[in-house]
Amino acid sequence: MRNSIKFLGMALLSLILGFTSCKKDKTEEEKPDATDKSVTVSLSTKNNVETDVWVYYSFSTKAEVSGVDSTNFKTSDAWDIAFHSRHIRLNGGTSGQGLAAAYDAGVVDFKSVTTANETGYTTDTFVVDALYAGNGATGPIYQDTDMNTVFENAFTVDENTHPPTYSPNLNVYVMKTRTGKYAKIMIKDYYNDLGESGYITFRYQLAEGDTRNFE
Amino acid sequence: MRYLYILVLILIQIFSYSQNATITVVDKETKKVLPYVNICFESLINSKKDYTTTNMQGEAENKCSDKCVISLSFVGYKTLFDTLNSLQSKTYELQADVFNLEQVVVTATRTEKALKDAPVITQVITSKDIDNRGVNNVKQIIEEDIPGVEMQRGGFGADIKMQGLESRNILILIDGERIAGETGNNIDYSRLNASNVERVEIIKGAASALYGSQAMGGVINIITKKTRKKLEISAGMQATQFNEINFPDLKYEDENYNFKKNLDLPNLNFNASVGFNIKNFSGRTDFVAKSFDAYQLYNTNIVVKDYINLDTVIYDSLSLFPKGIQGYKDITISQKLSVPLHKKLILNMNGTYYTHNEYDFVPDKKYLNFIDYTFGGNLIYSISKDFSITASYHQDIYDKYDFYERLFEKNKVYRNTFINPKLVSSFKIKKKQFITAGFEYLNEYMQSGLFIADSIASHTMNTSVFFVQDDIQFNKKWNAVVGGRIDNHSVFGTYMSPKLSTMYKLKHLSFRMNYAKGFRSPTAKELYMNWDIAWFTIKGSESLQPETNDYLSFSTEYTKSWLNTSINIYKNWLQNKIDGEWDYSMPRPVYQYKNAKHVELSGFEILSKIKFLKHFMLSGAYSYLNDNRPQADLVSSTSPHTGNIKLSYQYTKKRYEINIMLSTTIIGAKEFDKEETVFFRGDTLIGTYHVYYDAYSMWKLVVNQRLFNAVDLTIGVENLFDYRPTIIDFNTSMSPGRRGFVSLKIDVDNFFGRKKKKKTASK
């Protein structure tokens, strides 16, 4: 009898512990690898408030760029990459005077992409009826815009939920920056830590100097 | 075996000679001794009364001082009367109450009545039904047992339907008290743990005269357990197969480890309870922890729309997006205490704490956390046998939080509170009339982000209530209950709801007639909501009036020793039903709440239970519904035909019991025409197409064994034939497919009892 009570007590205790301990399982990310030269950026500006508001980022200053908007982005040399909702624009092609272009290396481990291809890069184009800011008060709005279609598979969007659910596919994209240097980039998240949408997190790494090597 | 039985009897006899005269109570069929049987002795000489209960050996002292009338009663058995002399030893055999007709119920009249005497047909699910099936939530057992009840999934989650009415017209109570906290008008069903349920009572039809707002389509009253024995300790555990492993190769290094792990929780339920009862001073603590595995359902077939008016068929491509069913993890702790302050004065107190995490498939690093506290109690003053006053207080506070997984912080987004004091008096007049009257006050508070964009706002509503009910017993055959209620609501003013039910009994037949008015006050959301969701806005209206209904039903019940069957015919007229209507005149479409619809619902239900070949019971139910609403406008429609069939086998030996049950729930086909806007050959047109959902049945097989009268071991299979619809929406089943489960429950105190018995036997 005593044994069975003991057993029951243990079972109860382990269950309670099991239920409460889950809370602290994992709140911090693992220690960064010393050899890892990549940078993870969480943008602090919401990018899906209005259809023509993009969030611009520069690889040279490693920061969001202010003063660039829909009126002057095509002539500005202050930015490399820009984000609106799930869409991405690069400073090149129809979007800018830079050399930026990209290709999709697929859903692979970020580290496994060690060199950038020499060719096969796509620049920005003018897309009709593409832009969709589905969240918040604006509702779904389609608009013609300049963007890079290579990144269109960065997220899977489930429009059956309200609001739509954005799940990152974690593709690795290899790109040229505005100045023609090589970089690899992975789009990791659509939500900030408060669960608000339109806050992009991405991880990128620039190639050594002017080489195509990501070592 | 028989010799052993005789030996035990002899031992008991020998033992009993050393004491006074002994009464022994056993089960008529199994000859098992019955502990805790209530015995009442009433002297034939001076009408003096004395009470006792049998001990673990099923024995009690004969407390009769001269010639007595003795009555023996016990839950699940028919009450037995006899005359007895003092110092006479006797063994009584109690007959099991196969159809539970002696079961005491309270919902129909708010007073205690045997099921067979309740003037409104009441369906009861007992704790035995729950144990025999290893079920761990009340929602599931209601769905399986009660015809015409359908558990579906609306946009927000689970949705209950009864006789065609949605959850907002059905009132769910725990021990007669309202439950705070809703999502899309549905209470948080996860709060309804089965392990501490004594019984569930279901009445269909309007009952606002007793319960006020929302009791239009029916009342589900969950009665929780009280401790009867000196000491009760039990523990149980249930494990069900995973619904779906969403992330089979999840590694701890994964950045979204928490998010993914929370979507793959095991289907577990653990419960434990401790209770005591010493001379009516009693207490009980219940603990339940459970977790549920999230899963996704994919369409396996394409949607085909045959636009009749356009003479065109459109084949939609296969939807790539699944319907996600949230996972959860929660803990409930409840405490009860009953203190006899004085012979005539009893104080009951209770409180519960509940915390629930709900995990969805949106990778936004937050999940919902619900926290609920209830506390309350009552003071019962029994002035005389025929006159009592009860003062009670109940408070339920339900909060919703957004929990941010990475920040480990939470933010309150919702609060709903009910404060409900009551003063009720009941008294008898000349043993023919039983009057119950009382005052109630209900304060309802709702705080939510849905009232004003981007901020949390709150609204309070108050209701003062007077109600009265007269239960008149004209003669042995003829009973009528008349009652009414006046609600004074702080927003809508005064509202009256009368009711009348009568019952007439013939030898094997009972006839019942029930008329009642019901109403529902618009909720704070329906009044004040202004919520931008996706590409449209849901708007409330402050000019809304309460919805009302008139409900009329006739039923006939036929009972023989082996058969219990009833037919119930009803009609339900609803006025001013509140529903959303689309308004496309604005640039942004508005879904506006309006008192627009007059709805007529009618139907009938047939319920039968047949006991045969001693060990078998076959029960079946069929429900027909005629709903005049265009079904395409409903979020989910109800099939006109629903039913269930259950075949069970029970075999009992002294220390062993086996129950095998095969059951099915059948949902008939649904069909209706649906209209939608289509872009067709350059024009925007309204296309009409026919929607058809096949009938389906869900089967379940359960084998339950009870060993040593203390251990319940149950194994079972849900969705036995692995039914899965090929297209998933709000009108189809949300079952993850065939899943097995195993559960174990131990009544620890029954081991103690056994040990004691051995000792006395060895004397």
Image: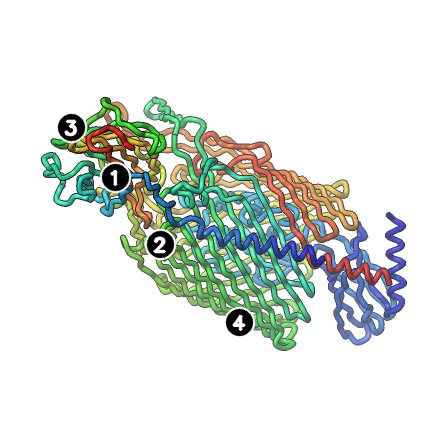
Residue B719 drawn at (x, y percent): 57, 36
Q: Badge 3 local density, few (<14 within 10 Å), some, or many (20+)?
A: many
Depth order, front residue of B743/B462: B743
Q: Chain of mark 1?
A: A
Q: Quadrant of residue B39?
A: bottom right
Query: Disc 3 designates what residue?
Result: A93
Query: Disc 1 designates what residue?
Result: A85
Q: Chain of mark 4?
A: B
Query: Disc 4 designates what residue?
Result: B391
Depth order, front residue of A116/B121: A116
Residue B112 sits above or below residue A167 on the image: below
Looking at the rendered structure, the kind of residue marked 3 is Gly
Identify which residue is drawn at 41% across, 45% down: B156
Query: Disc 2 designates what residue?
Result: B525
Are marks 4 and 1 in one subunit? no
> Which dot, 3 or 1, sits closer to the camera?
3
